[in-house]
Image (cartoon, rainbow, N blue to C red):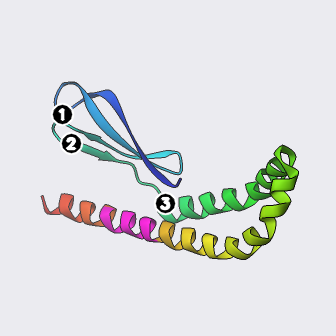
Amino acid sequence: MLFHDEEAMLFCMHCQKETLHDIQYMNEIISSIECEECHNQMSIDIDAMEQFYSYLYERLVSKPGRLTEEARKDFSKFLASMPMRIISKPMRFTSEYNQLNKEVKDYVSKVKSDEEEQENE
């Protein structure tokens, strides 16, 4: 998963107390932390496209190992599912690529709009 959120109790420098924070990750790297109480946000400058391509590369490189592990667990099931997977995998990969690409573009536009908003304040 390229993007995911987690919550944690952290000390907020703005509130001056320990509060619940929303932590957003991009490819296992923290991209932003927001206080749930005062909504003070700290963003970390991340090259979104680099993380996107790194994520896709890792998925592609790890595929042979994942297939080998599947074959070891249940070879007959693995062989039976292979013809359909060979046909459907390009479509699933394209769909995943398009979805992730959209998420990255939305993230980049959100970061740009947040930066412009901060400049106008």
For the C terminus, the image quarter is: bottom left
* Residue neighbourhood size for the residue with mark 2, other residues' Cα within 10 Å, grouped as few (<14), some (14–19), many (≥20): some
Where in the figure is residue 58, as x and y percent of width and height?
A: 68, 56
Magenta highlight: main SS? helix
Q: Tell me the amino acid under the disc marked 2.
A: Asn
Which image quarter: residue 60? bottom right
What residue is shown with label 3? 47
**Crowding at mark 3 (Cα within 10 Å: few <14, some 14-19, many 20+):** few
Image location of residue 4, percent across then percent down: 44, 48
Where does residue 89 sit, x and y in percent of width and height? Answer: 69, 70
In the rendering, which numbered label is found on residue 57? none
Write down the residue under mark 2: 40
Identify the magenta region.
102-110
Where, by quadrant of the figure, is residue 40 drawn? Answer: top left
The count of marks equals 3
Up the image or down, 33 lies above or below 95; here it is above
Q: Earlier in the sequence, mark 2 or mark 1?
A: 1
Q: Earlier in the sequence, mark 1 or mark 3?
A: 1
For the residue pair 90 and 46, the one nearer the viewer reads as 90
Q: Residue at x 49, y 60 (%)?
A: 47
Between 40 and 21, the one lying in front of the other is 21
Q: Are marks 2 and 1 in contact (CB under 8 Å)?
A: yes
User: Disc 1 and disc 3: Cα gap in Å?
Assistant: 27 Å
Q: Amino acid at mark 1?
A: His
Tell me how far mark 2 sits from mark 1, CA to CA: 7 Å
What residue does disc 1 label? Answer: 14
Q: Amino acid at mark 3?
A: Asp
Q: Give the left or right position of residue 36, taking residue 67 as reference.
A: left
